[in-house]
């Protein structure tokens, strides 16, 4: 297979018309942060898409750019120091980055909604949970207070919070961690969005609660046929929920594939190393595998493939040439000079 | 919530006793002859001294003196001066004047301070921000009497915009400039406090959430941001009322306002112990009461505190 | 300034004292080259125009206070009534005061008393308050409760009123010796302001006590005095330092205020406050009597407040 940039490969392969648009599409996004110490290249040509009813997991370490991409989609990036240096975001074919501020605001929460990592700090501590859910309904849908209150209680019941009618009048700090997260999910659904971006929704929670929240998210997504982008660093969390997975490193997507293929047969050394580092029951008594080194400073990304200092397969070409996207299967791409070898288990 | 109030009240009482005792001690128990100058140029006759000592409990130990005094105060009896003037009456006349002055100062400092603080807090580094910062530094550095003198001279004597001194009865309009002088220092603090609170909260996660919910900028700032930033500022303003009343002496002196500051100043200088103790004790009570109210207000404003 | 106690409030130091402490611990961990908090702060401070200007002014004033004869050779106490209240001229840059003494000379010489009062009052306040705060913070329990209540009691005294009471009582006892006069003023300033440093130090001490390195030291059996001196004090220094610089300025202003009321320093001591107090009755006819000492006073206080502000920003954990 040739090294071809495969933006439309998925559609072509599926036999659809070339004009089919995705629900949400990020195309070639470049974002920089201008700091006192220099320019950090946070996103370097990120592209992915999302369709209704599917879950895309965006996987990566801290600093890989996964949250920044989401914030750019939502339009909540801190604009100094952040600068969008190139690329587009399309929602139902409408380009967002050049849209007016008014239009972007209209789309927030009603078109694309976001759930954040730490519900305790993400929710306003001085207002009740009910207030925070209802204000969207009142401000943006013109609902009366009573109707908004009713709907808020319904939403809390939807996310399986017991005693919703009482809870709706309580403050965020009165909820437990898991329930707070549920409340935040309820809040994000208030305006019936088509896309839900969940930025590390379970990272701050216990393992048992994590599973519950992930199940809840999946259930809601299927029910409403929403597109969901799940941002996380935890491979384990993603396994049962994601349809497709995009792995990010140093502001680039290094591998994109459907979930089953990715786990069974990773096509990039980084993905391979990530999977390898997961602790497994049959590894008892052995030391855990780690990926040597640290993610690169975005002020100073290594030349060539950004993963090369930590890659066990790195060759000279890796240090000099940035790998282009290689199609290694149906709808799969990988940015590695040796993608085929990796995918065939070499 | 009830337990919180109760606890605060209980903590208040020992402090109240301690401070009022300290005042009593400082006024009555320090070196100095309380009867100096009361009888003209000659030292007072023994009979007079004995009678006075009896009347003012000066023969008892300091603790007993204090006890008797406080019992009287709690019944509303502030006693008499050496000349037989009812302290309570004098205080009742002068107190409202100072209260009016302090209220004006509070309003002025709140209006200007909040506005300046919000504007600069939202906007961040820039010309306006630096201007405001330097102005606040300047205000902090100017002693009240310098501000008072300068404004009195400029506005009152040179340009004739205001009357240089305030008439008795202290009409509100004449209290504006003195109020500004009194509150100038606090105004600087309110500005800085607001600015810091807004600048910090601007970056808070919940502001990002509010933006992600598609709320208008006006609502995000006016409702979410302000509500959180208001807490430290309002608590400061609350305690400031008591502090302003206590510190009004200079302003009252310069603008000739017949308030308790004036009263206590003359009392201390002429060693009128009863008057001095009376006024200061009252001020302390007001201050501690305001602190209590502010603490309660804080619990109302910030729901996280209620479940302490 | 009427209330040095609120200087700390304006510096927002009392609430966040604990932040300074934890930041101090993490300072070298976050920067690429290992630098102590002090080095980091100095590096930052040198670049701030506020700091440079303030620092230069302060050095100038300290010089004035230490060596007044460098700036003027005129005797500040020599007064000729015939010259009384003459305006600025080539002979006397600032004119003559109500007694006919040279205002410029008096202003220069007045720096010493004003600065000395400020410095001593600050030192005493930090010493008393700091000690009590560290003990309260470290010991905890009923000791903390007791000390905190005592601090609350003094805190409840309105500053100006308390100063008036103390000073009127003691001034007769002190007599006319300059040392006594200055001493009483310093003492009364300190006794009314120590609760603020106590709170700052206590807050920092409590925070330091919870840091891991202190727990480790205790587990190793280190004596309390060692823990306090070597571990807690250095990291609690930052917020106190910020307060101290601002308080210095405000104490100088407070001295002037007290002198204005006729209670603070007085002849034979010369200070800016005394000069301003003397100028009161002549303001309309001879504003230069007020102008020059007041100007010097304001600039000095401003310099210290600016310095304190710059130091606070340099040490501010939120900027790291």
Image (cartoon, rainbow, N blue to C red):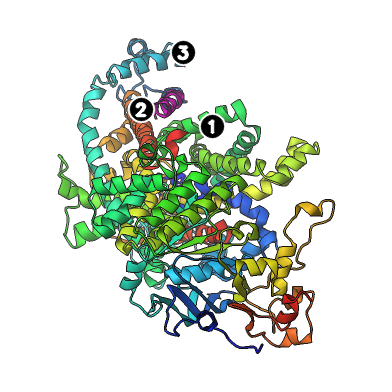
Numbered disc 2: secondary structure: helix
**Which span of residues is magenta-colored?**
B1-20
Crowd around label 1: few <14 · some 14–19 · many ≥20 (10 Å): many
> Alpha-carbon neighbours of circle 2 within 10 Å: few (<14), some, or many (≥20)?
many
Which residue is farthest right?
A285
Locate residue B106, reporting x and y percent.
29, 47
Q: Are marks 1 and 3 on the same chain?
A: no
* Left or right relative to C87: residue A211: right
Q: Would residue A160 be visible to someone looking at this image?
A: yes
Q: Does C44 appear above or below B241?
A: below
Residue occupying the point 77% across, 74% down = A345
Choose between B31 and A342: the one closer to the eye. Answer: A342
Please name the residue that numbered disc 2 is placed on: B281
Image mark 1: chain: C
Relative vertical location of residue B73 with respect to residue A174 in this rendering, above or below: above
Pinpoint the chain carrying mark 3: B
Which residue carries the number 1 mark?
C148
Instruction: From the image, state whether disc 2 or disc 3 is nearer to you.
Output: 2
Give the labeled residue for mark 3.
B61
CB atoms of marks 1 and 2 within 8 Å: no
- As for residue C252 lying within the magenta part, the answer is no
Discs 1/2, front: 1
Distance in Å between CA atoms under marks 2 and 3 = 20 Å
Compared to residue B86, the image places residue C316 above or below, namely below
Dominant SS in magenta: helix
């Amino acid at each position: 297979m040739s090294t071809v940039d495969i933006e439309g490969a998925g559609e072509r392969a599926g036999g659809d018309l070339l004009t089919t648009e995705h629900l949400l599409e990020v195309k070639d996004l470049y974002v920089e942060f201008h700091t006192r110490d220099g320019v950090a290249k946070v996103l370097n040509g990120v592209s992915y898409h999302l369709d209704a009813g599917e879950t895309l997991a965006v996987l990566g370490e801290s600093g890989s750019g996964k949250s920044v991409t989401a914030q750019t989609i939502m339009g909540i990036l801190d604009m100094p120091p952040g600068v969008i240096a190139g690329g587009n975001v399309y929602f139902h074919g409408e380009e967002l980055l050049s849209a007016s501020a008014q239009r972007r605001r209209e789309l927030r929460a009603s078109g694309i909604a976001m759930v954040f990592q730490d519900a305790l700090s993400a929710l306003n501590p001085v207002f009740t949970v009910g207030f925070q859910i209802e204000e969207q309904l009142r401000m943006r849908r013109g609902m009366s207070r009573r109707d908004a209150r009713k709907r808020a209680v319904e939403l809390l019941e939807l996310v399986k919070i017991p005693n919703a009618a009482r809870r709706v009048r309580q403050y965020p700090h009165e909820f437990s961690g898991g329930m707070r997260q549920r409340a935040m999910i309820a809040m994000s659904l208030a305006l019936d969005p088509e896309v839900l971006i969940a930025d590390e929704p379970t990272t701050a929670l216990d393992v048992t609660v994590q599973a519950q929240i992930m199940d809840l998210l999946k259930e809601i997504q299927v029910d409403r046929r929403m597109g969901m982008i799940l941002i996380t660093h935890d491979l384990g969390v993603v396994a049962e929920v994601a349809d497709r997975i995009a792995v990010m490193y140093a502001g680039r997507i290094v591998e994109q594939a459907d979930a089953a293929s990715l786990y069974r047969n990773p096509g990039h050394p980084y993905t391979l190393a990530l999977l390898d580092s997961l602790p497994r029951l049959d590894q008892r008594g052995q030391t855990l595998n780690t990926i040597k080194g640290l993610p690169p400073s975005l002020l100073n990304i290594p030349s060539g493939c950004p993963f090369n200092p930590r890659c066990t397969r790195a060759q000279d070409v890796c240090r000099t040439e940035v790998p282009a996207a290689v199609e290694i299967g149906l709808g799969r791409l990988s940015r590695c000079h040796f993608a085929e070898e990796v995918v065939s288990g070499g | 919530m009830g337990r919180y109030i109760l606890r605060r009240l209980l903590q208040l009482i020992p402090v109240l006793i301690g401070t009022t005792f300290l005042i009593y001690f400082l006024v009555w128990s320090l070196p100095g002859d309380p009867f100096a100058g009361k009888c003209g140029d000659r030292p007072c006759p023994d009979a007079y001294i004995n009678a006075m000592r009896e009347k003012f409990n000066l023969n008892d130990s300091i603790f007993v003196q204090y006890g008797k005094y406080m019992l009287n105060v709690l019944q509303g009896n502030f006693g008499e001066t050496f000349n037989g003037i009812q302290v309570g009456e004098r205080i009742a006349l002068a107190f409202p004047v100072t209260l009016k002055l302090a209220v004006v100062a509070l309003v002025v400092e709140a209006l200007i301070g909040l506005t300046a603080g919000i504007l600069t807090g939202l906007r961040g580094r820039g010309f306006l921000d630096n201007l405001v910062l330097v102005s606040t530094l300047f205000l902090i550095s100017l002693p009240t009497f310098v501000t008072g003198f300068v404004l009195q001279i400029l506005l009152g004597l040179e340009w004739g915009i205001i009357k240089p001194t305030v008439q008795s009865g202290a009409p509100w309009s004449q209290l504006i400039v003195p109020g500004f002088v009194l509150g100038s220092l606090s105004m600087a603090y309110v500005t800085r406090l607001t600015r810091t609170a807004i600048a910090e909260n601007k970056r808070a996660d919940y502001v990002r959430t509010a933006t992600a919910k598609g709320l208008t900028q006006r609502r995000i700032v006016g409702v979410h941001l302000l509500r959180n930033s208001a807490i430290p500022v309002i608590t400061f303003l609350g305690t400031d009322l008591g502090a302003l009343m206590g510190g009004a002496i200079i302003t009252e002196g310069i603008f000739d306002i017949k308030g308790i500051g004036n009263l206590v100043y003359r009392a201390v200088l002429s060693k009128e112990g009863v008057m001095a103790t009376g006024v200061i004790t009252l001020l302390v009570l007001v201050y501690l009461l305001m602190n209590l109210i502010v603490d309660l207000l804080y619990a109302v404003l910030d729901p996280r505190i209620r479940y302490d | 300034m009427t209330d040095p106690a609120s200087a700390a409030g304006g510096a927002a130091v009392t609430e966040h004292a604990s932040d300074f402490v934890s930041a101090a611990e993490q300072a070298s961990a976050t920067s690429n080259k290992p630098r102590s908090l002090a080095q980091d702060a100095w590096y930052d401070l040198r670049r701030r125009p506020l700091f440079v200007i303030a620092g230069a002014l302060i050095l100038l004033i300290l010089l004035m206070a230490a060596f007044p004869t460098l700036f003027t050779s005129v005797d500040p106490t020599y007064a000729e009534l015939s010259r009384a209240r003459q305006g600025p001229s080539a002979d006397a840059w600032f004119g003559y005061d109500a007694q006919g003494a040279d205002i410029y000379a008096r202003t220069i010489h007045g720096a010493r008393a004003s600065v000395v009062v400020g410095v001593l009052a600050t030192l005493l306040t930090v010493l008393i308050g700091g000690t009590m705060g560290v003990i309260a913070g470290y010991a905890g329990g009923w000791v903390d409760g007791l000390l905190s209540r005592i601090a609350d009691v003094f805190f409840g005294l309105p500053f100006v009123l308390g100063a008036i009471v103390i000073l009127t009582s003691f001034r007769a006892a002190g007599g006319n010796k300059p040392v006594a006069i200055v001493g009483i003023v310093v003492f009364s300033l300190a006794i009314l302001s120590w609760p603020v440093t106590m709170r700052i130090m206590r807050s920092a001490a409590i925070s330091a006590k919870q840091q891991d390195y202190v727990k480790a030291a205790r587990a190793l059996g280190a004596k309390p005095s060692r823990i306090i001196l070597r571990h807690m004090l250095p990291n609690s220094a930052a917020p106190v330092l910020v307060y101290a610089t601002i308080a210095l300025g405000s104490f100088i202003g407070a001295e002037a205020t007290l002198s204005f009321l006729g209670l603070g320093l007085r002849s034979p001591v010369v200070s800016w406050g005394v000069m301003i107090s003397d100028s009161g009755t002549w303001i309309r006819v001879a504003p230069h009597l007020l102008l020059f000492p007041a100007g010097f006073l304001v600039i000095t206080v401003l310099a210290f407040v600016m310095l304190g502000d710059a130091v606070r920003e340099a040490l501010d954990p939120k900027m790291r």
